[in-house]
Amino acid sequence: MAIAQAGPPKARVAPWNDPVIRGWFFQLVVIGSVALLAWYLVSNTIENLERQQISTGFGYLGQEAGFEIGDSLIPYSPADTYARAIFVGILNTLRVSVIGIVLATILGTLIGVGRLSPNWLLAKICEWYVEAFRNVPLLLWLFLIYKLISDLFPGPRQAISLLWDTIFLTNRGVYFPVPFAHDVHSWIGVGLLVGIAGAWLIHRWARARQAATGQPFPSIWVGAGVIVGVPVLVWLMGGAPTAFSVPALKGFNFQGGIVIQPEFTALLVGLVVYTSAFVAEIVRSGILALHKGQSEAAYSLGLSRAQAMRLVLLPQALRVIVPPMTSQYLNITKNSSLAIAIGYPDLVASINVTINQTGQAIENVLIIMAAYLSVSLTISLFMNWYNRQIALKER
């Protein structure tokens, strides 16, 4: 009977040489060091604030702010709290950021495609645009645009009137009519959202239909008709109110209507023209990353240059364009903080006044950091989701 011989005994590994134990040890050391550093900073800060008799905490948010904000999307007065003043600043930041992202994407895409145009003059104009705007600091463009608006447009008494004296251009802003408040307006907003959803469903159906049958469908025009038609239909069903508040000069300024402040205009234009130059290069590089055979195949099928760009090249280039485009969207949001240089009441401006009045800089800076971090992470999550939607799916 054969007796199985045991193999050589395994060498005993010292705990320090075990990679698992060593990995856990170093992680615990790093976590402990970070926690110790955080404890030191927090305790030292609290001790210094108490020594200087500076109050801490966020209780001041419920106190009366006492300062005005010139541009607000929601009702606000100096009698409101600091929390509402900061919220107004956040809304102003979001307004200029969202509009800037949309306009910069559209303008940058057009400039990027224009740089690839066979028309020499158009391609050169787009090239000069990119080189001029992206190589000059954004802050200088903001100063220049704000100065141009202040100097080129006259005061309210010499305002430039347009459309039968209903729109007025002044150095204090652009005044234009606005409908009087009516119950149907909220339903018109709902109708607009329904129209956008309907246009999206029509576009999806048209793509599936074209993939199955090869027959195109004018989804863009039909979708635009749905987006416009549904709110118009709701407006007609609601009695078609046509009463408008028209701006009129009274005293030294206009009363009635609504005004777009010059600070908002300067900030928005500066963000759009500056960021669109970077977007244009991203779009151009994304299209050039495609194989030349893609465009040749599109032309061989009888597609025009515009159709080839819209149906073949840009959809494929999106997979290259979207990741760097996310960085530009984040830059628009963060660069909007330069608004304080030209007096636009964004989040940083509201916080700056709050710090001067309350002296609680740490809490206010934390609010700024939390606000920009939340917005940036939201943009990143959305763009990552969209990037996964357009990614090539393996079969």
Image (cartoon, rainbow, N blue to C red):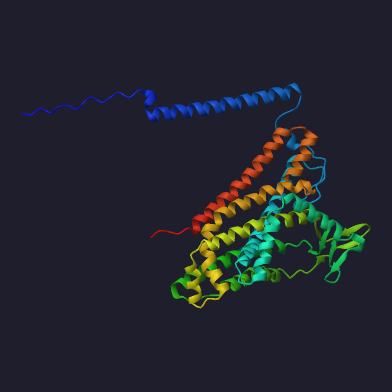
Name the residue at 67% across, 37% down.
366
Quadrant where the C terminus is found in the figure: bottom left
Residue 54 appears at what percent x and percent y? 75, 27
Residue 373 appears at what percent x and percent y? 62, 43
Is residue 61 depicted above or below 332 in this figure?
Answer: above
Name the residue at 86% across, 61% down.
153
In this rendering, position of residue 32 left or right of residue 244: left
In this rendering, position of residue 199 left or right of residue 270: left
In this rendering, position of residue 328 left or right of residue 217: right
* Most foreground residue, 258 or 172: 172
Quadrant where the N terminus is found in the figure: top left
* Most foreground residue, 285 or 91: 285
* Most foreground residue, 209 or 147: 147
Residue 80 appears at what percent x and percent y? 79, 43
Given the current orientation, which residue lies at the most extreme right position?
251
* Most foreground residue, 88 or 2: 2
Name the residue at 39% across, 30% down.
20
Residue 215 seen in the current view: no
Residue 17 appears at what percent x and percent y? 37, 26
Is residue 252 depicted above or below 81 in this figure?
Answer: below
Given the current orientation, which residue lies at the most extreme left position?
1
Residue 322 seen in the current view: yes
In this rendering, position of residue 348 left or right of residue 378: right
To which quarter of the image does residue 178 belong? bottom right
